[in-house]
Amino acid sequence: MPMRKELRAQWVKADYPSYMGSAEVRQPPGPDYIAGYHLSSAHHAISNLVFGRIKVAKVSDLNDPFELQAAGFKIRRVKTIVSQFRAFVDSAYGMVCFSKNWTSPAMWSHYADVHRGICLGFDIGRNVAKEVEYVNQRLSVQAPISIGDLDLSDKFQRQMMLTKFEH
């Protein structure tokens, strides 16, 4: 596909960084959507295309050490509660992660079969996508709020789901 430099200005105008990998290949998604990229092995990517689906990962299959464990464990009870929460989410839910940009060598190494994989691009509804916060240290937890059988507030649960390690 030929590069089209005139498209880069459209991506910047749509509030994407000027270095976006797709910026000279296609137009940015409309205002109700964001561009999301999913890197995987060629085997999984081809399977996803053939069957019209995308693999949903269990939390226990993810490789980020902060995945649902971003809280600091200074209080023993917090560690127990967070572990129970992670186990519950792992048994009941899955997740699909997307990147805002597909040009990161680290992403290709970790998620795309050590640079031999494929990147699939999607236009994802803004009302569906959730922004991840990248941090370089665990979240400080003073005292969790009791909710149901777990001592975790809804806000804290969302924070745990949307926090990843910076690198």
Image: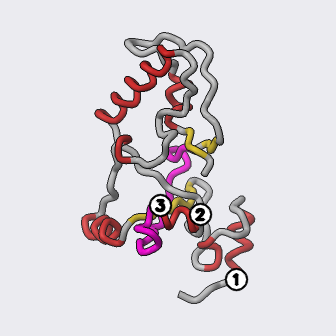
Percent position of residue 42, x then y: 35, 72
The alpha-carbon separation of the residues under discs 3 and 2 comes to: 14 Å
30 up-or-down from 2: above or below? above
Q: Which mark is residue 5?
A: 1
Amino acid at pointer 3:
His
- Look at 35% across and 47% down and name the residue there: 61
Label 1: which secondary element: loop
Of 154 and 138, the residue lying toward us: 138
Name which residue type carries label 2: Asn
Determine which of the numbered discs, if any, sits on residue 110 in the image: 3
Which label is found at residue 31? none
Nearer the N terminus, badge 3 or badge 2?
A: 2
Tell me which segment is drawn in magenta. Answer: 111-130
Q: Earlier in the sequence, mark 3 or mark 1?
A: 1
- Please name the residue that numbered disc 2 is placed on: 101
Question: Is residue 49 shown above or below 110?
Answer: below
State which quadrant residue 93 falls in: top left
Residue 131: name its quadrant: top right
